[in-house]
């Protein structure tokens, strides 16, 4: 009996007459994927079965699958077969300024969206499937002690009491807030009591929340340029007026002529994406400025757990007493993204009001997951996991740096890079078209992000480069991916400089 | 060695000179609670320990604790001691129009919030601790088969694969969307494919999302009056202009003179809070109106699983082909609120765009919980649980109706009530001050909500009444709580009418 898919492919195959058989099979499968008949993340039939259905040799199918893989349409997963990629090459719409990939964008029925919805969509930049070399900002989720975590969860769910099952309004699970307050005091020099903490789903939710609870339409917000597109997009959707501020090796350079900000959004420990560290002088300057103007500072401390040498830089929040800082952190980088737990530390005089607003907007979070996380931290597993990941990521970063220095030259490592974080910036010469290089690499299965896309305005400094995430890439995979990347650079006339 | 709390109380006690000793101890403890020294949800010391510390008899402490309990400051939990209530009588700020309880509101430092944040806060109406007789809209969370659910979760977490751990962008876990599409087709006559579903955290998030993705500032939205304050508050925060429409026994009455709406927000199956069902004629009328004006309809189908007699009313979404309806549902009422999972079914031409916007705002949900829920549904546990709860809630509702009819009279049951849902409306005469009755009942440990607070505008119909949730209240507790409520009504000159 032939499967539905088999029927469909046979029909298509009969219409293809040119080229080698394996290539015709490849084209049929590719079209079936781009038409959506084979949806992203579906498993392809086993090569043996499909060969039988199409009455071709198994090698023909294997060759077709290989070509699909090489072009980014499918991914082979060890032990679980071949799957349609979630990121189809055609779908790579993370590159708003590029005109080569409008296909997917134009397929959106934009006329039904609101203006703010349309603008938000057009600035959307999340990649569909964020895994593999060199997706930035993703931890190695396979290294997390899932068994340990589930064991705690299982135990707690047996004791589930009413207060952990209903709507909650105290800004998150008390035990988690206590564990976090302790952790943040010690690890990040944050000055806070447990009750200043609000549990969130991560940085995006926190920015969405703060930009509405504390800011009105047309309030001014200063952001770093280059900076994090995700936060920028949310601030814009909520009606704030954005003022990008240049960044140097000391972090954001406040512009004395810019309008008075209601909000200043910073990544002080590890400027995103360049990697510089906000200097003490700038910290004092920005704090003073915020105090004078009654501005709030968002301190997005997204990956500060991962410093591989020297002492961690303490938080801006804790530099002085009662700073006007909303400190934001996330477990997405230390545990895994789909845990969807993060946190804010808010100034004392905001706690009561923000707690009510948060409860009213979000109605509390999943208490069982939060309780589990609290125990996971209290029992020491969290600190142990971070220590282990710090060593692993340090090794991976060193390996990547070595590859860059050996095969391209030391000038290709961005000069603001510190030994920290989950990604680094591969610096490219000014003539490089980092967007096209990104697309070429993607087609060949290597995911990077073009640095130029992180800039909001023309910059005096070099804006060309590639963000390479190294945390979720084992060394062997890194080696292969890097050689693909070198080839892409070469085809764009970028050669080693030594 | 004396505890810190012991010291504090002794100091306070020395300043109290009047009244019986137990009453002095009561006053000290009460003030310690209202001052926030003993925070909500902290456990009081064991009576024996505190007696020793204060050098009084244990009976004195027990009497003081009892009085604290009677006035709503603490709650005794069987087997786990006495706890400071989360809802302090002073804190009951769910009653915006009432002038007797501004204490807590004024303690908010409102000057730091944005205008929209302030307005949102001032309309916030979630109760702090939503459990017990007669909190509306809460299922009996103790009846959920938690063990079954955790077993599935434990099994799945052992097989956790990468795609369930990273950021996701396809609007939720595929398996859950498939299970839901099937369920909604059968149980709610919703016309949809799995890919029209977006997994949310619940109705609030869905409303927050849709009101920004599809509506701009000053777009008009029609809502039911009386209606759900939670949705109304979020729509307002996002800058929409709200037009309340009166409701009768056939549901919303569209006002021909109101401005053309971008959005029409409805609870067609079980009008919230009155309980009427949107008639077929009104359904057709509103659908036509939406089509002519290119409006979107929000169908909030929050508790339609629970109809206790007759056939369930099919959804508005599925009444015709391609309705301009965003159908919203939640597991908060069928499983438990802190699961934080809900769903939207969106029209096909919106799917692609809304999925990107959702991923960009929320970065996917917790995949493990979603996968677990999918299996829980697929294995039939979900349908079985709903069937069981339907019987239980039907019994509890009948019991409450009987109490009302026997002790107050049949006129006290609101005439729009159907045999459905998790709450009913106890109708009061027009002279009744339902807000004061609510507060009096709260002090005595019984939680109800005043109907008048659900109205946005003066109404021709009676606006006085109390919402009584019956789903989470066992019959024995209901009996006691109801007699407390009767006493409160009596003290407000409301007597049985037969």
Image (spheres, coloured by chain):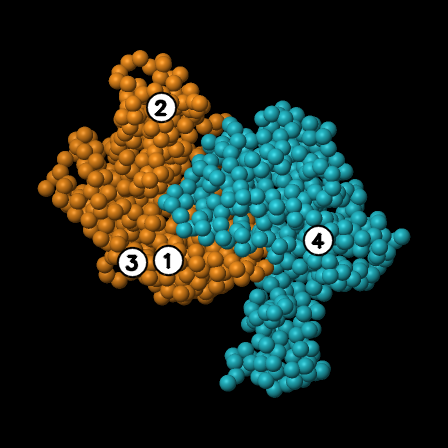
Chain colours: A cyan, B orange
Q: Is residue B265 above or below residue B461?
A: below
Which residue is found at the position 71% from the left and 82% from the top? A20
Of badges 2 and 4, nearer the viewer stands 2
Q: Label 1 belongs to which residue?
A: B287
How many angstroms separate mark 1 from mark 2 (CA)? 70 Å
Circles 1 and 2: CB atoms closer than 8 Å: no
Residue designated by label 4? A470
Foreground pick, A231 / A43: A43
The image position of residue A239, as x and y in percent, is: 56, 41
Q: CA distance from mark 3 to mark 4?
A: 51 Å
Observer-nearest of A474 and A298: A474
Which chain does the residue under circle 4 lie in?
A
Reading the image, the residue beneath label 3 is: B388
Which of label 1 and label 3 is nearer to you?
Answer: 3
Residue A482 position (above or below residue B42):
below
> Furthest residue to the right?
A498
C-alpha gap between disc 4 and disc 1: 52 Å
Residue shown at 53%/62% (left/top)? Answer: B159
Which mark is on residue B52? 2
């Amino acid at each position: 009996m032939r499967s539905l898919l088999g029927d469909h492919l046979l029909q298509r195959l009969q219409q293809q007459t040119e080229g080698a058989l394996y290539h015709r099979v490849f084209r049929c499968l590719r079209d079936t994927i781009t038409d959506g008949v084979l949806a992203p993340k579906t498993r392809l039939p086993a090569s043996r079965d499909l060969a039988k259905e199409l009455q071709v040799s198994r090698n023909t199918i294997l060759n077709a699958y290989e070509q699909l893989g090489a072009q980014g349409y499918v991914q082979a997963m060890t032990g679980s077969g071949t799957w349609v990629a979630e990121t189809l090459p055609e779908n790579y719409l993370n590159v708003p300024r590029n005109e080569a990939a409008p296909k997917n964008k134009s397929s959106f029925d934009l006329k039904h969206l609101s203006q703010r919805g349309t603008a938000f969509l057009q600035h959307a930049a999340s990649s569909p499937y964020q895994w593999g070399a060199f997706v930035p900002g993703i931890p190695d989720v396979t290294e997390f002690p899932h068994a340990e975590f589930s064991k705690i969860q299982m135990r707690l769910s047996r004791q589930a009491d009413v207060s952990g099952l209903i709507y909650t309004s105290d800004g998150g699970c008390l035990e988690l807030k206590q564990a976090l307050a302790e952790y943040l005091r010690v690890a990040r020099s944050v000055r806070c009591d447990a009750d200043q903490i609000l549990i969130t789903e991560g940085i995006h939710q926190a920015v969405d929340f703060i930009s509405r609870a504390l800011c009105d339409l047309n309030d001014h917000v200063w952001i770093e340029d280059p900076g994090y597109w995700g936060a920028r997009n949310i601030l814009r959707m909520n009606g704030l007026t954005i003022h990008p501020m240049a960044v140097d090796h000391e972090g954001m350079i406040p512009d004395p002529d810019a309008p008075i900000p209601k909000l200043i959004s910073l990544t002080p420990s590890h400027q995103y994406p360049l990697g510089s560290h906000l200097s003490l002088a700038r910290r004092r300057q920005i704090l003073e400025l915020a105090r004078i103007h009654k501005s709030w500072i968002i301190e997005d401390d997204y990956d500060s757990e991962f410093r591989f040498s020297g002492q961690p830089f303490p938080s801006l929040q804790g530099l002085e007493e009662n700073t006007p800082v909303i400190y934001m952190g996330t477990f997405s980088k230390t545990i895994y993204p789909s845990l969807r737990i993060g946190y804010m530390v808010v100034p004392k005089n905001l706690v009561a009001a923000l707690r009510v607003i948060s409860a009213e907007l979000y109605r509390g979070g999943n208490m069982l997951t939060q309780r589990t996380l609290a125990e996971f931290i209290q029992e020491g597993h969290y600190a142990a996991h971070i220590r282990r990941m710090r060593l692993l990521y340090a090794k991976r970063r060193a390996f990547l740096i070595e590859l860059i220095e050996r095969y391209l030259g030391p000038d290709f490592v961005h000069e603001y890079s510190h030994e920290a974080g989950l990604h680094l910036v591969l610096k490219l010469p000014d003539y490089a078209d980092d967007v096209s290089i990104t697309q070429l690499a993607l087609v060949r299965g290597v995911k990077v992000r073009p640095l130029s896309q992180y800039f909001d305005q023309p910059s005096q400094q070099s804006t060309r480069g590639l963000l390479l995430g190294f945390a979720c890439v084992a060394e062997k995979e890194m080696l292969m991916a890097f050689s693909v990347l070198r080839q892409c650079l070469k085809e764009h006339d970028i050669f080693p400089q030594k």
